[in-house]
Image (spheres, rainbow, N blue to C red):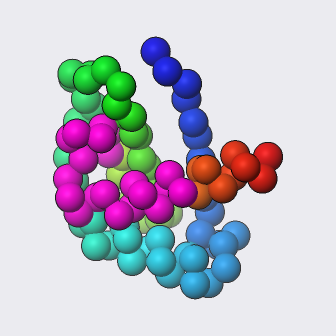
Amino acid sequence: MGRTISLNINLDDLPADQAADLRRLIDESDFINLDDAPLKKHTPDQFRYTITVDTGKFQHTVHTSDSSAPETLRPLLHDLLERTRTKERSG
């Protein structure tokens, strides 16, 4: 089992342009309608992701991996991974 990387983002804590970008990526991925079933099969050497969006009005979690992520979700995954790398570099 690999390492776990966690990132919690509160849009209210982000600059307005970054918060707007994340909202756009969430909307464009049609996140609320993505399958929320946990992954049953794990492929070695792939990242697995658990993404939860909580708006205060609804909460939705998606479990996916590098190979199972829908195309619509990939831009959001890329953005979140970049934010995680930036967080790790800044300590």
Taking depth in this image into account, of 84 and 19 the one nearest to the observer is 84
The image position of residue 25, as x and y in percent, is 37, 71
What's drawn in magenta, residue-wise? 62-82
Question: Would residue 19 be found to the left or right of residue 13 on screen?
Answer: left
Taking depth in this image into account, of 51 and 67 the one nearest to the observer is 67
Taking depth in this image into account, of 55 and 2 the one nearest to the observer is 2
At horizontal 21% and vertical 41% (from top left) the residue drawn is 68
At horizontal 58% and vertical 57% (from top left) the residue drawn is 83
Task: Please tell me whether residue 40 belongs to the stretch shown in magenta.
Answer: no
Residue 54 appearing in the image? no
Question: Would residue 34 be found to the left or right of residue 62 on screen?
Answer: left
Q: Which residue lies furthest to the right in this view?
A: 91
Q: Quadrant of residue 48?
A: top left
Q: Which residue lies furthest to the top in this view?
A: 1
Task: Please tell me whether residue 65 belongs to the stretch shown in magenta.
Answer: yes
Total marks placed: 0
Question: Would residue 64 be found to the left or right of residue 21 on screen?
Answer: left
The image position of residue 73, as x and y in percent, is 29, 58
At horizontal 58% and vertical 40% (from top left) the residue drawn is 6
At horizontal 39% and vertical 77% (from top left) the residue drawn is 24
Q: Please, is residue 5 above or below residue 60 in the view?
A: above
Q: Please, is residue 90 above or below residue 4 in the view?
A: below
The image position of residue 62, as x and y in percent, is 32, 45
The image position of residue 29, as x and y in percent, is 27, 65
Residue 9 appearing in the image? yes
Q: Which residue lies furthest to the bottom in this view?
A: 17
